[in-house]
Amino acid sequence: MDAPRSRLSPPDVDTTKPSIARVYDAFLGGKDNFAVDRAVAMEGMRHFPDRGEGAHNNRAMLFRGVEYMAEQGIDQFLDIGSGLPTMDNTHSVAQRIDPAAKVVYVDNDPIVLAHARAILQTDERTRVITADMREPEVILNHPDVEGFLDLSRPVGLLLVAVVHHLADAEDPNGLVDAYKARLAPGSYMQLTHFCSCAPEMRELEAVLLQMLGTGRARDMPEIVRFFDGLDLIEPGVVHVPEWRPEEPVRHPLDLGGICVAGGVGRKS
């Protein structure tokens, strides 16, 4: 039997079924995943041979977005669909710029709660809750959100690589709009999403839907729609390596560069 690699296995974690957070961790080359999660990642890489580069590009844009927002004075962040903690995280990036920055991590996988609490137990400026992004009122009214962040002030809302796990029937636009409606003026939203800009993305989508039950690629206009009502920060919605890169980007982009698109928008 393949022994789990994960460092923590809470009793309410089903290790026989893949989870979004653990599959993403496997794509990133992490160790907090199980054989069933690695099988999904390996099959995805077989059909979309970027060797996880798209996941790394997405993570790098997350950090650039958090840095940008913190530099604009944002000192509280709500990271929904945060996934498993890695070597660098939203709070560590934000707190390098502002040591007083607060972060709430939200994920529907209980293993995220266990791992994050173990890592963050001495950090009084972070909270972690288990909740599903499909229930915005549950999240926004949670005592560790509403009672920790000041939602009457600007917040950095992070929806990074999570909205593409919503089916069309679940009204992803309506859900994103519900979060935007609760943001105070001056808030920012960062969102990234699988982009159907290459035929190979449909193969990856098929693998994820078959093995994970979720994961949909949408085209650029659909991704731009999520930012309706916000002022897009330059360069707008682009492939994630092109969003305010720290070094020159080589074109044409490879598969790992075009598979995810996103941007940052500000609420006036």
Image (spheres, helix red, strand yellow):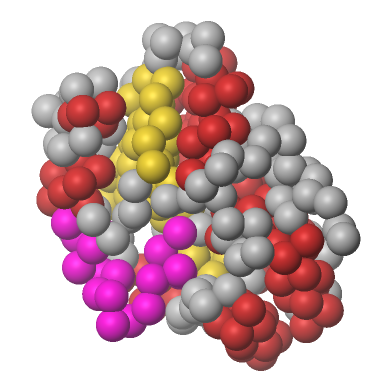
- Start and end of the magenta stretch? 162-178
Residue 183 is covered by the magenta coloring: no
Q: Quadrant of the C terminus?
A: top left
Task: Pick whichever, 202 or 147, lies toward us.
Answer: 147
Q: Is residue 158 left or right of residue 113?
A: left
Q: Is residue 13 above or below residue 222?
A: above
Q: In this orientation, does residue 201 appear?
A: no
Q: Is residue 33 left or right of residue 105?
A: right
Considering only vertical position in the picture, is 147 above or below 229?
A: above
Q: Residue placed at 19% from the left, 60% from the top?
A: 177
The one nearer the camera, 18 or 206, is 18
> In the displayed image of the protein, which residue is found farthest to the right?
1
Which residue is at the front of the view, 8 or 94?
Answer: 8
The answer to whether residue 4 is seen in the rendering is yes
Q: Please say if 122 is above or below 168.
A: above
Residue at 71% in and 71% down: 40
Give residue 237's position: percent from left, percent from top.
Answer: 45, 62
The image quarter in which residue 254 lies: bottom right
Q: How many numbered callouts?
A: 0
Q: Position of residue 41 (x, y in %)?
A: 74, 67
